[in-house]
Amino acid sequence: MFKPLKGVKVLDLTGVLAGPYCTYQLALLGADVIKMENLQNGDWTRVGGKDESLVKKSMGTSFLIQNSDKKSIQINLKSKKGKNIALELIKNVDVFVENMRPGKAEKLGLGWKNLSTINNKIIYCSISAFGQDGPFKNRGAYDHVVQGMSGIMTTTGTKETGPTKVGSPYIDYATGLNAAFAIVSAMHEVKQKNKSIRLDVSMLDTSFLLMANMVTEHLNSGWVPTPMGNEAQSGSPASGMYCTLTSPILLAANNDVQFFSLCDALNTIGSFDKEKWRLESNRRSKQSELRKEFQSIFITKTAEDLEILLNNFDVPAGKIRSLPEAVSERQFKERKLWNKINIKSINKDYLVPSIGFKVDENPVLPKKPPPILGCDTENVLKEIGITKDLIKDLRKEGIIN
């Protein structure tokens, strides 16, 4: 079993998506992740999602996505006693992760300076929209706002449609992965230098790095990207999207080898003059004419048949799939990216994501369902020496739940 972070303790004061997705990666790698939630409803994603039976149990699908293999404790951090409990927990953890606006953790007494004094080997990871410095640092944001601010939306869609958002909150997920990568890297630094480390992970920074090619080109040459629609980033005259008898298909013919293989493939189902288009300069200057000739052949066949044909000729190609189509295929199933977890409170199995790679040919899968709100409070507090009687008193006072 692949658990490289076994023995690592993480205190998780994050909510919604980027932060919890970060700590989920750590949990899947074997870390003991303690999710610290408020006394009211906990992480608000607990009541998000399409399955009402889960929402009623504070286990909405929005929460299930990134909280398996974690523990849940409820502490009132606005109270002095609650803060003291959190500080006591800090003494016994290796990593602290928060995703509040800059300055808010400090107001709670959980800022970097305070915690690094209490635990001089702690890894303190802050995840925020814009980072801990800069003129935007105090702003809040969500994925779609950051997409708009990063410039990526002006490169998607077309001139006719205008800026177009990527459907999935991909910046949130990428930021979570970025933070997890930073934390694992920092663990080695702590071992080498025997000191605490502060990590500052920003959604906007992550979004820029997800379009590093465009940003680098612009900064160095002044080039400004324009809406590309469904065209290939390579700018190759033959690459891009074509219509077929069924759904559209995307292909890549980015060099002469791929282009001539594409020509050979199409000549098995139609008539195409490869010699006419042998020179790349000709293909570029007459791209519209070239694409029309290709399109006249593509429209006579189904996307399914063309995908098989082109890949048999080593031309990267794939039909555009709906999500239901994509996840129903053998490729998706055999990679075992999603794993069944039984939610005991409603006695039903649900599929949740695993980590994004295999180890020794095996997927790294979650073993335990996401925690019921506050279900681990008592056990976690006992581990730091708080007695059963004191726990009862703290519950009565509204300090814990």
Image (cartoon, rainbow, N blue to C red):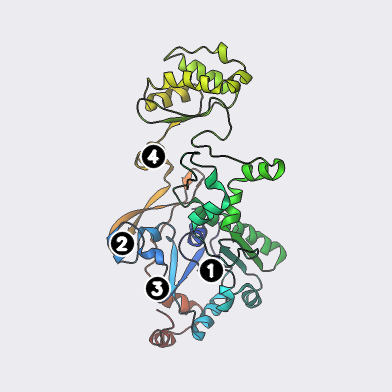
Q: On screen, 388 above or below 70?
A: below
- Residue at 53 percent across and 37 percent down: it is 228
Label 1 Cα neighbours within 10 Å, binned few <14 / some 14-19 / many ≥20: some
Per the model, the C-alpha gap separating discs 3 and 1 is 21 Å
The numbered mark at residue 326 is 4
Per the model, the C-alpha gap separating discs 2 and 3 is 17 Å
Q: Nearer the viewer, residue 187 or 197?
A: 197
- Residue at 56 percent across and 63 percent down: it is 128
First reached walking from the N terminus: tag 1 or tag 4: 1
Disc 4 vs disc 3: which is toward the camera? Answer: 4
Q: On screen, 126 above or below 105?
A: above
Residue where numbered disc 2 is placed: 54
Check if mark 2's residue and mark 1's residue have beta carbons within 8 Å. no
Question: Where is residue 206 drawn, in percent x and y?
Answer: 58, 53
Tag 3: amino acid: Gly
Q: Nearer the viewer, residue 78 or 207?
A: 207
Residue where numbered disc 3 is placed: 374
First reached walking from the N terminus: tag 3 or tag 1: 1
Disc 2 vs disc 1: which is toward the camera? Answer: 1
